[in-house]
Image (cartoon, helix red, strand yellow):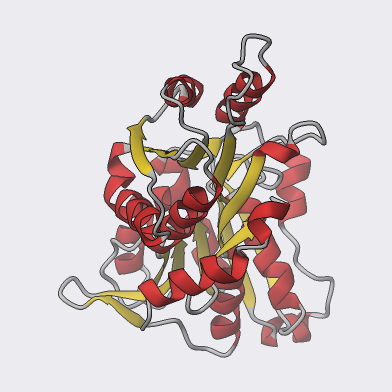
Amino acid sequence: MKRLVTASLISALTLTALISPQAQASTPVICLAYDTGGLGDRAFNDATLAGVKKAQNQFTFTIEGVVTDGTTADRTKRLRALTAKNCATIIAVGAEYAKAIAPLAIEFPNSQFAIIGDASIAALNVTSITFAEVEGAFLAGYSAALSTKSGKVAMITTPSSADNYENGFLAGVVASKKNVRSFVKFATTELDFAAKALIMLGIDVIYTANTGSADGVFDAIVKANTSKTRKKNAPEVNLILTEPDLYLTVTPATSKYLLASVVKRVDIAVSDVIGRAVNKSQLSDVLDAKAGIYGHRYNIADKGIEIVIKSKALAAQSAAINAAASAAYAR
C-alpha cells in the first residue's frame, strides 16, 4: 500500500475548481490529508475519494489535497500547510495522523479537523470518525457459521485489535445457533502462514480483520483448494475480508472463494463530514464524555457498517444475517 507518489498524482489530488476569485471566496474549501500511497491504494484513500464524489452530488465546494510519506514530521508539515488554506474542515485519513493533529488542534483552535479511524484526541475542533468494528465482526462470524461445511471457522486479526473484533466474531458464530467451533489466530505479518495453519486444522471459512493486502491469505486459500493432494471430500476453504482495511486481487477463477466483505462505509462518513462542514457545523456525538472526545461512531443501524455478500448461497441468507446483527446491536 505504501507507494511512491508522483508529482502528477499530487497535482491531481488538488482538485480546486477553476472559478472566479469572487466565487472562490464564498465557496467552502474541503482539505484532505491522504494517507501513504495516495489515490489508487484500493483502501482508505480511495474510499475517502468516493465520499468526496458522493458529497459533490449534494454540495458545492472545492478541494485541496495532500499526500504524506508516512512520518509524523511529514504528516505535521502537510496538515500545517492546509491550515493556511482557509479550510472548512481538514480531513485526515487514518489513525496515524492522530499524533500530528493533537498539538495542531491546540495551536490552531479556529481550524476544524476530522480524522478517519481514530478517537483519541480530546479537542472540540476535532471530529473523530470511527466504526463499530465489533458489529462488523458479528456479521462476519454469523456468515461464516452459516457457510461452513467442516463446522470450523476462524478469524485472523492483530493482538491490538483483538477486543474490537474477537468478541463480535465469536458472538456472531454463537448467534447462528449452529454447532460450530471458532478459532482466533493473531498475526501482524505473514498472514499466509497464519491461513495455512488454520487450513491444516480443517477450518474452511476464514475471516481476516487486518490491514493492508489480503492477497497472501487468499493465495493460501486458492492453493489449498486447487492442490493435487487435497483430500477428495475436503470442503473448499472460503474467505471473508474487511474493507477498506484490506484490498484483494480477485480473478474470475478465484472469485468463488470470496464469500463476503464486511464494509466500513468510509464514503458515507466522509460525505457526512463534508456536508456538515459546508453548512458550518460538525458531527459532535459524545464518544467519550470523560475524555472529551467527540465525533461519530458508524454502525449497522446507520448503515455505516454492512456486509456485501459475494456468494450466491450465502446471499439467500442475507435477510437472516442482517436481522440477527440488528437484533444483537439494537439501539
What residue sits 74% from the left and 76% below the top?
Answer: 56
As displayed, is residue 258 above or below residue 282? above
As displayed, is residue 28 above or below residue 173? below
Q: In which quarter of the image is residue 187?
A: top left
Q: Quadrant of the N terminus?
A: top right
Left-right relation of 134 to 290 = right
As displayed, is residue 51 above or below residue 172? below
Residue 7, visible in the rendered structure: yes
Q: Where is residue 280 in the image (x, y as percent from the top left)?
A: 52, 89
Residue 304, visible in the rendered structure: no
As displayed, is residue 299 above or below residue 215? below
What residue sits 33% from the left and 32% below the top?
Answer: 186
Left-right relation of 171 to 325 = left
Q: Quadrant of residue 159?
A: top left
What residue sits 43% from the left and 26% below the top?
Answer: 198
Left-right relation of 215 to 92 = right
Q: Where is residue 45 in the image (x, y as percent from the top left)?
A: 61, 52
